[in-house]
Image (cartoon, grey):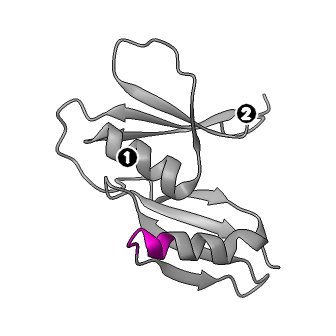
Amino acid sequence: MTIQSLNHVTIRSRDLETTRNFYVDIVGLRDGERPPFGFPGYWLYAGAAPVLHLIGSRGSTATGSGAVDHVAFAYEAEDYDRVVAALAAHGFDCARQTVPTHGSRQLFIEDPDGVCVELNFPAA
């Protein structure tokens, strides 16, 4: 048995529209086709893959990342300054880190439901 890749991550959201807008407008995913399940939600795509699924909270009051610490998205190295500027324009204060062993840069922000989101850029 060999796993081919991670298929997707699902985030339970208290406000689907706000969370969808965050991942589309801020992170850069694309809203795409989703099967007609019997509950509201979105499938958000990176390229042709629906990597992030959003579903309603079903009345849950739980917040934060829970057992999953964060979700990370990969960008091209040359996107770093553009993404930092876009985050600032949307009022996001992000934590920044450079990985000592290979120089990749990371930005950390929280989505509208308190999930930690890492934006990862390889060394230039």
The quadrant holding residue 27 is: bottom right
Question: Judging from the image, what secondary structure is the residue with disc 1 in?
Answer: helix
Which residue is depicted at the point 32% across and 58% down? 114
Q: Which residue is mark 2?
A: 48
Q: Is residue 36 magenta?
A: no
Cα–Cα span, label 2 and label 1: 21 Å
Q: Nearer the viewer, residue 121 or 64?
A: 121
**Camera sees residue 9:** yes
Image side of residue 83 versus residue 53, left or right: right
Residue positioned most to the right: 124
Q: Is residue 99 above or below residue 58?
A: below
Q: Which quarter shows the N terminus? A: top right
Q: Is residue 21 above or below residue 112?
A: above
- Label 2: few (<14), some (14–19) or many (≥20) C-alpha neighbours in 10 Å: few
Q: Which residue is mark 1?
A: 19
Which residue is depicted at the point 71% across and 62% down? 75
First along the sequence among labels 2 and 1 = 1
Residue positioned most to the bottom: 100
Q: How far across and down, in percent of the image, does residue 61 sit?
A: 16, 44
- Label 1: few (<14), some (14–19) or many (≥20) C-alpha neighbours in 10 Å: many
Which residue is depicted at the point 77% across and 71% down? 77
Q: How far across and down, in percent of the image, does residue 52 sit?
A: 54, 40
Question: Judging from the image, what secondary structure is the residue with disc 2 in?
Answer: loop
Magenta residues, as a range? 87-92
Disc 1 marks a residue whose amino acid type is: Thr
Q: Nearer the viewer, residue 56 or 47?
A: 47
The quadrant holding residue 96 is: bottom right
Q: How far across and down, in percent of the image, does residue 74 sit?
A: 69, 59
Disc 2 marks a residue whose amino acid type is: Ala
Q: Nearer the viewer, residue 11 or 44?
A: 44
